[in-house]
Amino acid sequence: MLTGYIAFLHQKRRFGFISCPEIEGDLFFHKDHRSAGYKVMREGDKVVFDVSKSDDGSPMGVNIQFVNNLNLDSLRKDFEKGSMLKGYLKKVEERYYVKDLDTYMFIPIVVSKYELNASEFYEMRLNELVEYKLIRFTSKNMIWGLLCHRQFSDRFNGIMSGETMKGELLRRVKGGYSVEFGDGESGFIPGSMAGLNHTDDCSGVRVDMRCTGYHEYYDTFVFEVISAAKSF
């Protein structure tokens, strides 16, 4: 049997890839080919397995057995420290990932709508070694990252400059308000920065506001209200 790591796992479609130093590239597997005692499969799992052939003759992992998972602990520490990491940029079903250099795990990459020439930027770097950082790590071990050295549009830089902008509140959301601005763009105003009475009906309230930050995971700007007035 060979030893490797669950590098990528598509839970809904029940397939994934195993990375193994003794095999060139990533080895396809289906979750049905894990051992009976392997109940919860996660990315980063260290496994032992055999290699068989699929119906089309290509190699695939079978008889997959769990060993341990130390990779998630390692990545969580990197996330908490804000470490810059390295890996190879990959693309699976039109979504970009970084195959982490140390853990072999596929980390989904968040691509901002404000990135400059994003498609060209990512496509030209496929299979190349890139720098990235982790931006979200949930209690259920769901992980996301983003590439370093991205370039942003003038629109992004203009909003981030803190210039006064006009917007209209859409609705209350958890922790604050959703606001629309520009050409159908949306942002978030924390309740503490809105200067509104929580009993107020926020729909139709027009605001002058400025950007105070940017949420990388949600690809959303955060604003504070300078002044507000109800539209009639």
Image (spheres, rainbow, N blue to C red):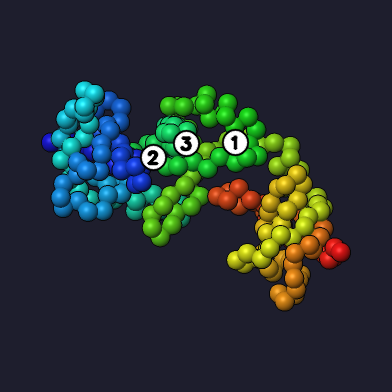
Q: Residue at x 47, y 47 (%)?
A: 144
Pick whichever of labels 3 and 1 is earlier in the sequence: 3
Q: Marks 2 and 1: which is nearer the front?
A: 2
Q: Residues within 10 Å of mark 2 (few under 14, many from 20)?
A: many
Q: Is residue 123 visible?
A: yes
Report the amino acid beneath label 1. Answer: Arg
Camera-side residue of 111 and 85: 111
Q: Taking 91 as reference, is 56 above or below it?
A: above
Disc 1 target residue: 150
Side of 83 where 192 appears, left or right = right
Quadrant (top left/top right/bottom left/bottom right) for the C terminus: bottom right
Disc 2 target residue: 106
Report the amino acid beneath label 3. Answer: Arg
Disc 3 target residue: 95
Side of 115 where 63 appears, left or right = left
Report the amino acid beneath label 2. Answer: Phe
Side of 194 where 95 appears, left or right = left
Q: Position of residue 95 (x, y in %)?
A: 47, 36
- Kindly report the distance in space between the C-alpha atoms of the residues bearing marks 3 and 1: 17 Å
Q: Residue at x 65, y 33 (%)?
A: 116
Q: Marks 3 and 2: which is nearer the front?
A: 3
Residue contact between numbered discs 3 and 1, judged by CB atoms under 8 Å: no
Element under label 1?
loop
Q: Residue at x 25, y 36 (%)?
A: 29
Pick whichever of labels 3 and 2 is earlier in the sequence: 3
Element under label 3?
strand
Residue 88, numbered circle: none
Camera-side residue of 14 and 87: 14
